[in-house]
Amino acid sequence: MSLSSMAAARRSTEPQIIEQIAAHLDNVSAPDWLVKWLIERDTLGQIYAGWNVGKSVLAVDIACRVAAGLPVAGRRTQTGSVLYVAAEGKNGIRRRFAAWQAYNECPVENCIYQTIPPVRLPGEEIERDLTMAREDIEAEHGPLVLVVLDTASATMTGDQKHGADMNDYLAALYRVFPGVTKMLLHHVGHADKTRARGASELPAACDWEFRLDEMDDFDKVIRLHNTKQRDAALHRDIYFRLVPVILGIDGEGDEYGSVVAEYFANYEPAAETTRSPSRTEREVLSLLNNLYERQRQTVTQSGHDSAGVHVLTTDWREACIAAGINPNTYRSAKDRLIGKHLILINGPHVSVLDT
């Protein structure tokens, strides 16, 4: 047998790891949307926000609407079973489902399930139990289409700031929930409020990502802002408000309840605060620029490239305090500058985006 025929025989019996792209372009399929234009089936994504902004309220609403086949903010949904992994505030989650049922005058579907014991992934035992639970759900109600992890940090082992730990967590999610849309609820960063907290491996792995911003504290108006869509255009902002729902009276005669999401068909946000920095903001920016310039001169004089110059946020804070700026004033000015996209916090470093 010739070498070429031996190679051909080997290829016919062994699994192939490559294929021609051009040979499959006639079989391109349209996106399989769980929530039209927002969340695709069999993907991983996150919704992140600060505390008490409405992450769980929104997730409960999406879970109930997917299970019932109801639209989310006017966007068609694909019906299926849902698993809610509530690692934080189980009693509060149940009240939110009860509030959703009462407010929408629609029963919560029997195909929505909630975990009972604490869930931390990865872990051989919990992965086995979740796999068996998924099989039970699907045997009773059909395919599991959505799993909500509330929150990412509370359902993972290890440290959310460590990339290796985050990768292990995500790998476990794919092992346990193949073919299922995985929705992670997460917190904003400590310094940079425009990004999710922790390791960059999570947003990098996400197929879609949304941030919740509180637009009106008095009326509890929340903006759902699309920050990433891997294979589609970013969706326009969606607005909803948090509506209180009374569920009953406790033993002392006081009302108790929860809140639900009510979407706005047409909402015009108030004009955004001007991007121009205030006097205090200009002062702290000036101190930041001074630190950068001093470091740039030092690096240049040593013969190195000034493109690698970084200013530590702690050095900037100390410079502001030394200049007589109150620490709380500095912190407020820094947060406003982040919100105006005039500075960028990247790990321990800060840089000016626009002066």
Image (cartoon, rainbow, N blue to C red):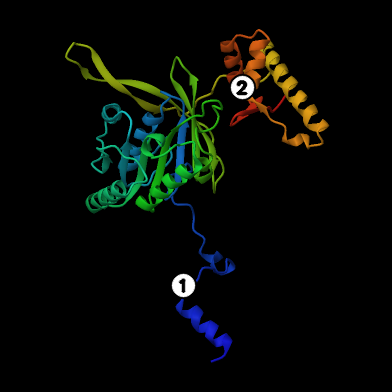
Pick the front one: 239 or 314: 314
Query: Contact, CB < 8 Å: mark 2 with mark 1?
Result: no
Q: Residue furthest toward the front?
A: 302
Which circle marks residue 314 in the picture? 2
Residue 289 lies in what quarter of the image?
top right
**Residue drawn at (61%, 14%), measured in percent from left and top?**
330
Q: Is residue 251 above or below residue 264?
A: above
Pick the front one: 145 or 114: 114
Residue 13 in picture, x, y percent from top left: 45, 79
Q: Which residue is mark 1?
A: 15
The quarter of the rendered structure image containing the C terminus is: top right
Q: Is residue 231 above or below residue 46?
A: below
Amino acid under label 1? Pro
**Residue drawn at (29%, 26%), measured in percent from left and top?**
92
Q: Is residue 173 above or below residue 346?
A: below
> What kind of element bears circle 1?
loop
